């Protein structure tokens, strides 16, 4: 793959004389690629400047070739991946045999249900970004700056200034709008690189915190460093260890992820638990969760009566359902369950027949995603302790090969799973190792890899100081907690009523997770990008009619947010009683 040309940056992007609207996109990973794709297809003609902190644009951190080998799999099939111009499989099919082999897709490039290595997805997005930046790609002129670390964003009623450093020099430019499409928040969140962390782990006894696909990445990375997987005549895997090591998954509930099951490409509509029906039951007050659960239970009972009888669904409520749902798995050996579940999932694919209760829950999580932001704080906490766990476990199904590798590692005596509950402690030992466990059962490990995934981030972690001050002042005025993160309006606009904040769109997942717990993954990235570009189009139409200039600016002056003089923030005025 040829690297994309990255402009070195001098005084700023594009000629100052250009009359086209200007948009800055912070980040150049898959979310930014979807944003640029939407701009080229449906947006007004504009100048787009992409500012990428790293040196591999298009790939994003989870799919970066530097952090992923061909043995680390993504958990989204080709037919599920929102296409950028062409489908993932169409792109894979036209690659040379040599490149298919290097990306780990040889022999399955044609299969829309195959799970490709993460690095193959990164290569796909990098190639599509290069295509989108070509002059003939659409009405937008695009320019890319690599190694451009955005230091600050200053939102004003007349535009937004973006300040960045590139190779030791500071640059600044003004834009009509900014799209924050950086996929991760703090650069020290090591959970996003669990597989890469395993590459440098040198201890013989390794603890991996978590048991999701990120944890599997870490275990597989360690396994290929210390031995080899081999396929038996019956198609099962065995693992041959060449250098001694051991891995323990430390999981709060002691569960392994379930294997991907077959789903139709076009799912039938829900009958009862639809977004419209859910919205009608939600009023923003305590008790909304109980009314939405009634719709959930009705849909699930009709979809799979046998499953409903197994857990005695009629006697469940929103707080007890998760306990009933997980009871059988919690009471069995995780590897025994994993083996049986893998057989069931493979049979589902072989017969092209879905698993009714799993498919119903999968579809309902999308409906619930539309109302979770409107739940009261008490109901949101209840939802997070119960139904959310079920939804996340169900949609986070993993490739069959990933489960087969776990079973092979366990059979070889390499991998165990330990349930640690909520009260486990972790401390650094005097010899540089780690001690983990409760007071009566403490174990020692040489290395610890955190694979719990991206945690929700609050406003205090937002990386752009002036914009952070602005949104924190707004949260203070509205009596909102900073730890809640962001809750953008339609189109992911920070605040459509504020002429300054209406110029900033945030698609950065960690800051949206508190109120949007399902807004993860590439499908959501594509949907957010489309909504963002649609909002930009509406703003452009409104500006052309001259409706939001002077009146909006005057209204802004009455707000108790940051006070500006030119481009400087002078103070934050707190509302008085």
Image (cartoon, grey):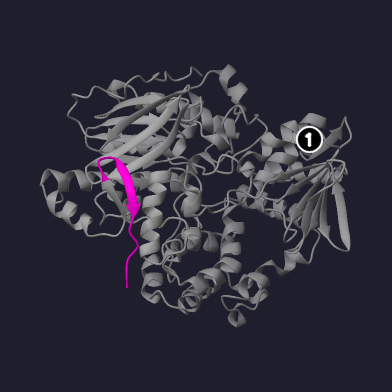
Q: Residue at x 63, y 31 (%)?
A: 68
Residue 27 appears in the picture as rendered: no
Q: Residue at x 48, y 17 (%)?
A: 2
Q: Is 448 covered by the magenta stretch?
A: no
> Is 377 left, or right, of 47 in this rendering?
right
Residue 338: image location, x then y, percent: 74, 53
Residue 249: image location, x then y, percent: 77, 50
Residue 485: image location, x then y, percent: 47, 56
Which of 380/97 is in front? 380
Up/down of 57 relative to 468, above or below: above
| Magenta span | 565-577
How dense is the environment of label 1, judged by Cα within 10 Å: few (below 14), some, or many (20 and up)?
A: many
Q: Residue at x 62, y 58 (%)?
A: 393
Residue hosting label 1: 223
Residue 77: image location, x then y, percent: 54, 42
Residue 338 appears in the picture as rendered: yes
């Amino acid at each position: 793959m040829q690297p994309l040309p990255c402009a070195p940056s001098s005084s700023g992007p594009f000629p100052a004389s250009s009359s086209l609207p200007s948009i800055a996109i912070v980040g150049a990973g898959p979310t930014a690629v979807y944003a640029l794709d939407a701009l080229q297809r449906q947006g007004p003609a504009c100048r787009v400047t992409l500012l990428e902190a790293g040196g591999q644009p298009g790939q994003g951190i989870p799919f970066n070739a530097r952090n992923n080998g061909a043995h680390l799999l993504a958990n989204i099939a080709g037919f599920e991946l929102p296409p950028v111009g062409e489908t993932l499989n169409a792109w894979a099919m036209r690659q040379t045999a040599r490149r298919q082999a290097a990306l780990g897709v040889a022999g399955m490039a044609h299969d829309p249900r195959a799970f490709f290595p993460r690095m193959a997805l990164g290569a796909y997005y990098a190639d599509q970004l290069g295509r989108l930046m070509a002059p003939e790609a659409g009405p937008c002129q695009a320019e890319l700056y690599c190694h451009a670390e955005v230091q600050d964003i200053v939102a004003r009623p007349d535009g937004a200034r973006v300040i960045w450093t590139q190779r030791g020099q500071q640059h600044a430019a003004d834009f009509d709008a900014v799209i924050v499409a950086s996929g991760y928040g703090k650069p020290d969140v090591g959970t996003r690189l669990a597989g890469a962390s395993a590459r440098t782990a040198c201890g013989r006894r390794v603890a991996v915190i978590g048991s999701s696909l990120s944890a599997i990445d870490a275990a597989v990375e360690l396994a290929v460093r210390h031995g080899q997987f081999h396929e038996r005549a019956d198609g099962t895997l065995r693992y041959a260890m060449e250098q001694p090591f051991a891995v323990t998954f430390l999981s709060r509930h002691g569960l392994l992820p379930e294997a991907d099951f077959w789903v139709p490409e076009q799912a039938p509509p829900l009958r009862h638990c639809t977004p419209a029906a859910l919205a009608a039951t939600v009023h923003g007050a305590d008790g909304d969760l109980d009314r939405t659960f009634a719709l959930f239970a009705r849909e699930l009972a009709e979809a799979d009566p046998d499953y409903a009888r197994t857990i005695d669904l009629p006697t469940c409520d929103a707080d007890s359902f998760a306990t009933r749902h997980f009871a059988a798995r919690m009471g069995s050996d995780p590897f025994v369950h994993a083996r049986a579940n893998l057989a069931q999932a493979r049979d589902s694919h072989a017969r092209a027949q879905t698993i009714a209760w799993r498919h119903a829950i999968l579809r309902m999580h999308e409906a619930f995603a539309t109302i979770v932001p409107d739940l009261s704080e008490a109901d949101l906490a209840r939802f997070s302790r119960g139904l959310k766990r079920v939804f996340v476990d169900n949609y986070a199904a993993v490739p069959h090969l990933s489960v087969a590798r776990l079973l092979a590692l366990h059979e070889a005596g390499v991998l165990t799973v330990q349930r640690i509950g909520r009260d486990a402690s972790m401390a650094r030992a005097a010899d540089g190792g780690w001690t983990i466990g409760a007071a009566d059962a403490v174990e020692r490990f040489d290395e610890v890899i955190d694979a719990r995934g991206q945690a929700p981030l609050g406003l205090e972690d937002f990386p752009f100081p002036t914009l952070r001050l602005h949104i924190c002042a707004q949260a203070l005025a509205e009596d909102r907690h900073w730890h809640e993160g962001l809750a953008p309006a339609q189109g992911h606009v920070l605040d459509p009523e504020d002429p300054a904040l209406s110029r900033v769109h945030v698609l950065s997942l960690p800051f949206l997770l508190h109120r949007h717990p399902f807004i993860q993954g590439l499908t959501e990235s594509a949907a957010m990008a489309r909504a963002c570009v649609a909002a930009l189009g509406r703003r452009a139409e409104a500006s052309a009619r001259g409706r939001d200039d002077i009146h909006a600016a005057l209204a802004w002056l009455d707000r108790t947010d940051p006070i500006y003089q030119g481009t400087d923030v002078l103070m934050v005025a707190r509302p008085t009683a």
